[in-house]
Image (cartoon, rainbow, N blue to C red):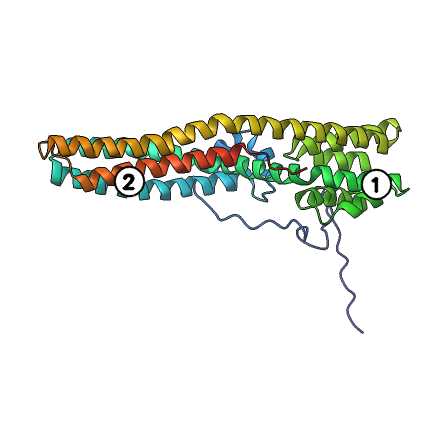
Amino acid sequence: MAPAKEKTTTPPGQAPSPFVSSPLRFASSAEPPSALKNFFSSIAASMPSLKRDLAIAESQKSPQMFVQECFFGAAALMAVLEVILASSLYFATVNYGLELLTSVILLSLGLPVFFYLAFQFNLYQPHVASIRRGKKIDQEIVFAGRHLLIGMRSGMTLFDAMLGVSQDYGQVSREFNKIVEKITLGVPATAAIHEVADHCPSAYMRRLLLQMANSLTSGSDIADSLESVLEQLAKEQVIQLKAYGQKLNPLVMFYMLFGVIIPSLGVAFLIIIFSLVGSNIGISGTGLLAGIFGIVLITQLMFLSIVENSRPSFDL
């Protein structure tokens, strides 16, 4: 006769064990042990908005783990910058007679400065990722909203209309897919829309979702509210495009002045001056031209980045 199986009982006051140790969809990677765990926890606790920033950036890392990665990444970048600075100071000491004490002081000051800048740069990455996500959402929000409106006008339910928009619209489809998934798992539609809106980096998307949630709560026609919001969003995007066109005029003027006219005329005047003065000035012509070329290159890249960042990310 086979022995009877022992019946597992749950101790009082303890929740029963699930069938899996952790949810399969959101299984988090095991955090490596660290002797500085309390230190990283205190830094993460001093930044209460970090957890929300990570959630908006769709990062599955905990604030403590993210701070730990930022810390070690900043230390590695600090070491690289210190090596570059030490090489430059050694070159200046050997060729130009820079004092050794000055080099040591500069290296000592570079350690905290480089580490602080690198650490702040790493901490800012979730915000950069959120801005990038927000721009991608703004690019498709009007088209996805019109698709949703057409579905609602044709007699589809809100769930079916959102299910139809949950693909082919990039980041907007990802947001609607989150809502559809939450509703499928049993979360009320209003609560699901509010949860997604709270972690959405796009102000346009948040306005659209909150208007839908308010219409559901009040019992009004969702299609009418959605149509009015889409008209406002389209008008605001047209205004932003016109403002961008007006902003390009002074940018082009400054680009022509500092990127084309001044460098070309400056090189011509320097050639004339050096031809008149001769070799009395102890400056190498090759080094001077290389410096001018570097300044022009930096100016060109700066203007290109300004134009690219100020351009609206949506199309009408």
**Dot 1, how many residues are within 10 Å of its Cα: few (below 14), some (14-19), or many (20+)?**
some
Choose between 42 and 185: the one closer to the eye. 185
Rendering coords of residue 301 (x, y %): 41, 38
Q: Secondary structure at mark 1?
A: helix
Of all residues shown, which one is farthest toward the bottom?
Answer: 1
Give the left or right position of residue 30, taking residue 262 as reference. right
Mark earlier in primary sequence (2, 1): 2
Image quarter of the C terminus: top right
Residue 223 point in image, percent of width and height: 85, 34
Q: Is residue 105 left or right of residue 114?
A: left
* Left/right of residue 158 with respect to residue 250 in the rendered view: right
Residue 126 in which image quadrant? top right
Residue type at the position of mark 1: Ile
Label 2 amino acid? Answer: Glu
Choose between 282 and 62: the one closer to the eye: 282
| Nearer to the camera, 114 or 65 | 114
Does residue 23 lie above or below 287 as drawn? below
Residue found 85% across the figure and 30% down from its top: 224
Residue at 75%, 33% (x, y): give it.
Answer: 209
Residue 107 picture location, percent across and down: 24, 35
Q: How many residues crowd around disc 2 within 10 Å: few (fewer than 14), some, or many (20 or more)?
A: some
Mark 2 lies on a secondary structure that is: helix
Q: Circle 2 is placed at which residue position?
A: 82
Label ID, residue 150: 1
Residue situated furthest right in the rendering = 155
Measure how far apart labels 2 and 1 are at the Cα level: 59 Å
In the displayed structure, would residue 181 be above or below residue 266? Answer: below
The quadrant in which the N terminus is found is: bottom right
Q: Mark number for residue 38?
A: none
